[in-house]
Amino acid sequence: MARWVELEAAEPEFAARVRRLLDAHKHKTMATLRKDGGPRISGTEAEFVDGDLRIGSMPGAVKALDLRRDPRVALHSGSEEADESNPGGWPGDAKVAGRAIEIEPNLFRIDLEEVVLTHVQPPDQLVIESWHPGPGYRRRQRT
């Protein structure tokens, strides 16, 4: 696990691009695990404070109950619609997976297990960049 500030120190350019996508939309999609182990998708807001990626929750919200029971979480930035005539113009999307640590009632810090940035490189090559604590940064391409 790593905090956001550790990603910024290890890969500042990559972290800046991921953050730009996460900041592009106020509302993100968050996945948690229900009591029975099934997935739950919720809308959430996220912010960067003091080197951490944080999410909040309303008191009594089921997503907070999920996170207290099982802290595994995934967060998706949301995506702009791609222009089919210019796929390389699509800014991409960002995904974060990790553990939610409650630092105050209903306020969670996300400790990172994986950060992924997906975008298209002209003419039609899918680029998947990722970072994991330990192994670090990786870039793959698919046609």
Image (cartoon, rainbow, N blue to C red):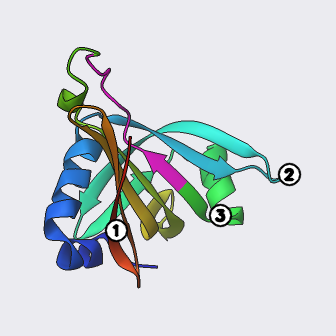
* SS for dot 1: strand
Q: Nearer the viewer, residue 6 or 71?
A: 6
* SS for dot 2: loop
Q: Which residue is under mark 2? A: 36
Q: Residue 39 vs residue 12: left or right? A: right
Mark-to-mark CA distance, 1 and 2: 34 Å
Depth check, mark 3 against mark 2: the one in front is 2
Q: How many marks?
A: 3
Q: Which residues are magenta?
A: 74-83
Residue found at x 29% / y 16%:
84
Depth check, mark 1 against mark 2: the one in front is 1
Mark-to-mark CA distance, 3 and 2: 14 Å
Q: Picture quarter containing residue 77?
A: top left
| Marks 1,2: beta carbons within 8 A | no
Residue found at x 22% / y 62%:
15
Q: Which residue is under mark 3? A: 68
Please report whichever mark, 3 or 2, sits nearer to the chain's N-terminal start.
2
Image coords of residue 6 (percent x, y): 27, 79
Is residue 47 located in the magenta-colored stretch of the structure? no
Is disc 1 surrounded by few (<14), some (14 to 19) or many (20+) residues within 10 Å? few
Q: Which residue is under mark 1? A: 138
Mark-to-mark CA distance, 3 and 1: 31 Å
